[in-house]
Structure formats: structure tokens, C-alpha cells
Image (tube, rainbow, N blue to C red):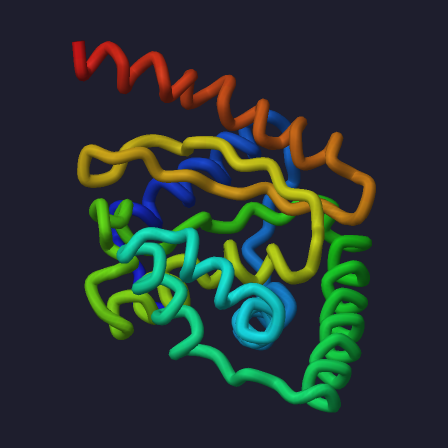
Amino acid sequence: MRTDAEVMARIAEAARHLADAGYAVSEVEVPDVSAAWRLWCDLISTEIATLQLAQMLELGSADFAKAIGGLLAMATILDAEGYMKAVAQRTRLLRDWLAFLEDYPVILAPMSVGPTPVVGGDVQDDEAMRRLFWNDLRFTSAISVLGLPVAVVPAGLAHGHPVGVQLIASRYREDLALEAASAIEARVGVMAERLWARSG
């Protein structure tokens, strides 16, 4: 993943905030994020192409249609056998993450490893869409397909824009994710207040 140094510095600060709050923080390799992202892309795109595409294009704007087209261009549209195999693979990957969360009850991960996207950044062209979702937002999409509880909190500013981190916990442990997010917010402050003050 191509990362932005200033964004990654804010994520590292969030880890230090957790350590200051009494968390035992370790830098470790998580289960396969790339495989989970691919599952997200293929499963959601297959569902859209099979069940929803005509209605979405009828009701959506031109930009919406470009975004959907960019998503579908990244995906493999699965047949019935491929879809069932992908669902089975999701179960295996979820098991890996649940086992990992037994040892590390909260995972601090980026929302994005790149700067905050510009308005319309996902509809410039298919390559921009892929760069945004495959590179910058890979962790976000990967966790979405696994269905694990996540709390999101700002960790500071990079290039003048908020940087978010996500706190990932195991099934039914939203409390752990929210507690960790609160510990970061207590040290960073409420970002909305800083942004309103800057714009005023």
C-alpha cells in the first residue's frame, strides 16, 4: 500500500494515545486484508450486478453511475458456484480474524492510508476509483465484508484535513471498540469543534 507520511504519523500518534491510556500496544501483522478486500469487491459487485444495477442507474446521478461503473470494473462478477465459494472463503477469513482478536482484543487500523480524498475523487476515472478503494481505503472495505464491529474516531489533521482511525473488535464487543475510540478522543479532542473554530 502506498502511504502518506503525515497520515501515518497521525495513526502512530493514535497508538501512543492508547498506550498513554493504559493499553498494551503492539505492532503486529493482522490477518489477510487484501483477500478480505477482494471478497468485499467481488461479493458486493456481484449482488449489485445481479439484483440492483438497473434500479440504481435509473435513480442515481451521473456521478453515481460513474462510481458504480468504477466499482464493477474492479470486480469479478461471480457465477452461482463462484459466489458460494466466496461466501465460504469469507467464513474462513472471519475465523482467522476472530482467532486473532482473541489475542489482540482491539485492532487500531487506518480508515485511509492516503490523504483525505478530494470531492469527486471516486468519479474521475476507473483508475482513480481503484487507487482510492484498493490502496487508500483497503482496510475499511475489508472490515466491512467481515461484519466486525468498528468505532471510528478522528486522530488529528494531515494536510489540513481530518484523519480517522478505526478500532476493530470481535463480535458483540462494540464496547471495547468504543472505549478505545473514547480514549483517543479524550487526548485528541473533539475534531468538530476544531474544524468549526477554523472555519469561523
Q: Position of residue 60 (x, y in %)?
A: 39, 53
Q: Position of residue 128 (x, y in %)?
A: 25, 67
Relative to residue 190, is residue 133 depicted above or below?
Answer: below
Q: Position of residue 2 (x, y in %)?
A: 30, 67
Which part of the image, by quadrant, shows the C terminus? Answer: top left
Name the image quarter holding residue 89. bottom right
Q: Is residue 34 left or right of residue 60?
A: right
How many numbered marks does the figure carry? 0
Q: Nearer the viewer, residue 70 or 136?
A: 70
The residue positioned 52% from the left and 50% from the top of the image is 109
Q: Position of residue 6 (x, y in %)?
A: 25, 46
Relative to residue 11, is residue 94 depicted above or below?
Answer: below
Relative to residue 115, is residue 87 depicted above or below?
Answer: below
The residue positioned 28% from the left and 45% from the top of the image is 116
Relative to residue 24, is residue 84 depicted above or below?
Answer: below
Q: Nearer the viewer, residue 136 or 72?
A: 72
The residue positioned 34% from the left and 62% from the top of the image is 65
Q: Is residue 81 left or right of residue 43?
A: right
The residue positioned 33% from the left and 45% from the top of the image is 9
Name the image quarter holding residue 94. bottom right
Which part of the image, by quadrant, shows the N terminus? Answer: bottom left
Q: Nearer the viewer, residue 189 or 147?
A: 147
